[in-house]
Image (cartoon, rainbow, N blue to C red):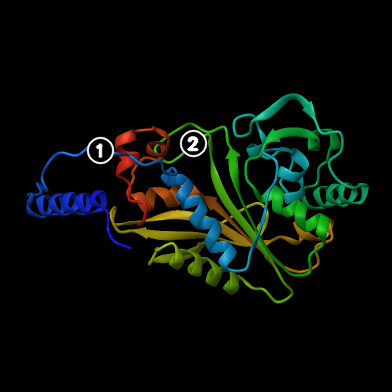
Amino acid sequence: MSVTEKGTEAAKNASQVTDESASRAIDVEAPAPVVFAARSHPLADVIDEVREIFVSLGFAELVGNSTQSSFWNFDALFIPQDHPAREMQDTFYLKDVSAKSVATPKQIKQVDAAHKNGWHYDWRLDAAKRMVLRTHTTCVTIRALADQEYDEARLFSIGRVFRNEKVSYKHLVEFNQVEGVVVGKNVTLRDLMGLQMEFYRKMGIKKAKFWPTFFPYTEPSLQSMIYNERLGKWVELFGMGIFRPEVTKPLGIKNPVLAWGGGIERIAMLKYGLDDVRELYNNKLGWLRSVPKCQ
């Protein structure tokens, strides 16, 4: 089969175009249109990174409601009903809303007894039924532990929490928290510190330390501090400890429970070199577009 005249002409024209392109100069400094590709928010990237790390460490994620009864948000964690944190100054209550039921009759009876024996006051069910915007995500994990009665487990939750605080460079009225637990017969405080150090290492945090502190529902309790190279000082990050027997025994949890929790915005501040947590929510397009996708 021979080439037609049209085919020969087309091949000749293509050759001429190729020769012209090869000899044409390219101006590498010529202006080009700026294109901003769609991307996720830098804070969302940090949340995804935290989630991926805990999943890689063998943890299963729990999801719970942003509104909770005071029973699971406070009472089940052995926080007395006259504790300052439960006042309107620290907690957002849902006006005229109460839970119809909060727990099983056995759980309610045993939590009631724990408060009476431990804090020496008359515990009230109506106060435990008051609905709140959760102040932490521990209410999600403690309920899962109480309902499922795990002998061994690695669980974590990530979610938005709410606290009636004055907004400042390091405090918000709502923020994201990661919280988790490890249940096991022989788990110790050393295991908890090792787990936290591995998490910090995977997040790129090189220097961390722990010191004793107080939390209402853990004993012993620790505060983790990490070194901010840019500021040249130690800053607090996570709180942690072992759930007190007054928390675990009334809910039928037999083995020790390691627990920790902390704000993700503080991790994001360190990661992106921010001095004010509000910068994460200012919606400044210049900053949002300048943050590298890969740190």
At a point 92% along the width and 47% down the height, the residue shown is: 105
Residue hosting label 2: 172
- Which of disc 1 and disc 2 is earlier in sequence? 1
Residue 107, position as x, y percentages in the image: 87, 51
In depth, the one of 62 and 89 nearer the eye is 62
- Label 1, residues with CA under 10 Å away: few <14, some 14-19, many ≥20: few
Q: Amino acid at mark 1?
A: Val
Q: Quadrant of residue 85?
A: top right
Residue 236 position (above or below residue 197):
above
Q: Amino acid at mark 2?
A: Leu
In depth, the one of 152 and 12 nearer the eye is 12
Mark seen at residue 34 = 1
In depth, the one of 198 and 24 nearer the eye is 24
In the image, taking residue 107 as reference, residue 52 lies left or right, namely left
In the image, taking residue 24 as reference, residue 192 lies left or right, namely right
At a point 57% along the width and 32% down the height, the residue shown is: 164
Which mark's residue is nearer the viewer, 2 or 1? 1
